[in-house]
Amino acid sequence: MRRPDVDTSHAAPAEDLTEAEAEAELARLAAEIAHHDRAYYQRDAPDISDAEYDALRRRNAAIEARFPALVRPDSPSRRVGAAPEGGFAKLRHRQPMLSLDNVFDPAEFAEFAARIRRFLGLGAAARLRFVGEPKIDGLSINLTYEHGRFVRGATRGDGTEGEDVTANLRTIGSVPERLHGQAPALIEIRGEVFMTKPDFLALNAAQDAAGEKPFANPRNAAAGSLRQLDPAITAARPLSLFAYAMGEASEAPAATHLAYLERLRAWGFAVNPLSEPLADADAAAAFQARMAADRAGLDYDIDGVVYKLDDLALQQRLGFVGRAPRWAIAWKFPAEQATTVLNAIRIQVGRTGALTPVAELEPVNVGGVLVSRASLHNEDEIARKDIRVGDTVVIQRAGDVIPQVVGVVTVRPRGPAPFVFPDHCPVCGSLAPRPPGEAVRRCTGGLICPAQVVERLIHFASRTAFDIEGMGEKTVTEFHAAGWLSGPADIFRLPAREAEIAAREGWGALSARNLVRAIEARRRIPLDRFIYALGIRRIGERNARLLARHYGGFAHWREEMLAARIVGSDAREALGSILGIGPAIAEELVDFFAEPRNLETLDELAGLLTIETPAAGAGAQSAVAGRTVVFTGTLETMTRPEAKARAEALGAKVTESVSKKTDYVVVGADAGSKARKAAELGVRTLTEAEWRELAGLGEPAG
Ligand code: IVH
């Protein structure tokens, strides 16, 4: 057989290939690598060097990464045996894969070193030589080599047993198929699979373009890419590996860790070039500081430094305690911070109308996450830290929480003016006052503010407010998206669209008719429900009833609220003197009426509705007013006719049979089918005592 041309040094780089060239090249590589595999595995007579062979596989992987659609069914990256269905097979590590204890400062590191000295019976003066290695936040893997050949590889798993990801590991260029030179007959080599920052960004951009979910950070991207049942997917992902540790070995490959790292390099592994021997604990502290400073400029994310005692014989003596070795430690960096430029301060309006300042940043990588936004908390924080647009700021990410702006680092050049927090909603332009004693400004235009209107309309139409059947979250969201609802008054314009509604997908003549009926049925509304439906902050059902009773009618309420805008006015005094309405509630009402758009909305509604003056007496206040109630079974404290009369006096409607429209079924002794029906329909049932409590009838006399 003709010796295939393996000199890839003159071949066009994968980046420069056209799709047609790539296809031809992948076909050629598949045939060629298959040939070498047969020569190696079946005839034990390789005809190229290991380095040349690895280069072929790397080239294949690189082209596949660029043209994932061209990955062949017989691609070398797939041919290494597919993973079993439903998951990966388990592989037991010959030696357990340990984790590391953490330290966070020089004192804790000194204590770690002192523990080693105590254990080994060394004096305080004995120098401990360490090797420092950047701690990459990827996933650790265990590679088994037999007679220099890569035979299997597994994830860490629970430390004892991991997942067999051999096929996937073979697609990674930096996992040598064969060890160059002499090697123990059996050796477990451990290292970290990771993704570089540029590879991570490019992968996420590709995910985005393909409409796929981006990965949260390089670690997740690496883990997700390695744990793929289809090795072709792994092959198309840019994974890297640094080797750094050893499990079982049939013979000791070195006397020191540093020498072992050298052997790893010679065998063909990538070893982190920043790894360094350190003469003592002071040198370790200096290395730690250097790594912390260099961290942001590295191509990959690190979360600390691993320090390993260099002498392997001493490592052996020290052994491990629990799941961590006594001879190594991870010195973690403090909370992950980065420095970047604050491009803008954007004010976000939440569904409740709260205005939240958000920092728009020059994108920066913070601990593996590309951060382009961070929280600025609130108005006072911005002022206190004197954060200005254009400043260079320090941002911090602790765990998975939203990144925060910690402070400003620039000595400011003449430049930016202090940030002025807006007093109007940036979304709808309504007034956004800051209630006294509160940290947050709120938009008062909730009924029409696009950021809030869906939420507000759901409330407006809900059971305890306008009670429009069929006008729930789904319908509100749908009609808002259709452009039919930009404020509450639009609900009462929906009947004019009956035909259009009927024609919508999922609707039909009947459901459109029912919705229109439900809307029309609510053109008359008691004032208290009307007030409550507006969703003014702090105005719940109870306060709405207090206001309705006090002011009596809509026109009067409106007039008084407008007058109350002036502090010290009679109207303001009157509002404040309503029992149960405190100054904070009064403030919210006044703020609501100060926004002209709210007045427009109110007047629009008033023109479309009949707002009823509440009935005098207890009924208007009762929690059961307007509710439909069924009594069943024998009541203890009153007869059924008395119960009915008292319920009606409280404004409830009493019916004989249970339906979906029933709000409460009051169940006495020996109740029969009505209680069952209630359970079937999911209607709320009450005991007699619960009913008395809800209706405010108090404890029975006697
Ligand atoms: S040595 C007994 N060296 O950190 C030795 N681990 O927190 C155990 N890691 O599971 C591992 N860089 O995933 C070692 N240079 C390095 C490392 C490193 C990152 C990870 C590894 C391990 C975890 C322990």
Image (spheres, grey):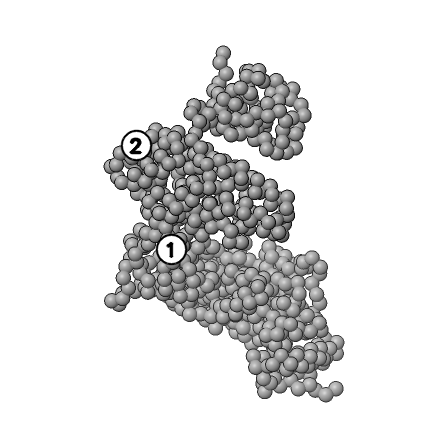
Q: How many marks?
A: 2
For ligand 1, tell me if the residue under mark 2 lies within 8 Å: no
- The image position of residue 567, as x and y in percent, is 26, 39
User: Residue 319's mark?
Assistant: none
Q: Is residue 75 above or below residue 644?
A: below
Label 2 sits on a secondary structure element that is helix
The residue where tag 2 is placed is 574
| Closer-to-camera residue (189/651) | 651
Label 1 sits on a secondary structure element that is loop
Q: Is residue 412 above or below residue 320?
A: below
Asked whether residue 354 is in view, the answer is yes
Residue occupying image coordinates x 43% and y 29%: 614
Q: Label 2 neighbourhood size at 10 Å, few (<14), some (14-19), many (20+)?
A: few
Residue occupying image coordinates x 63% and y 82%: 21
Q: Is residue 688 above or below residue 93?
A: above
Q: Label 1 neighbourhood size at 10 Å, few (<14), some (14-19), many (20+)?
A: some
**Of callouts 2 and 1, which one flags the residue occurring earlier in the amino acid sequence?**
1
Left or right of residue 85, residue 458 in this image: left
Left or right of residue 136, residue 635 in this image: right
| Closer-to-camera residue (469/137) | 469
Residue occupying image coordinates x 33% and y 47%: 433
Q: Is residue 686 above or below residue 468?
A: above
| Residue 173 placement: quadrant | bottom right
The residue where tag 1 is placed is 426
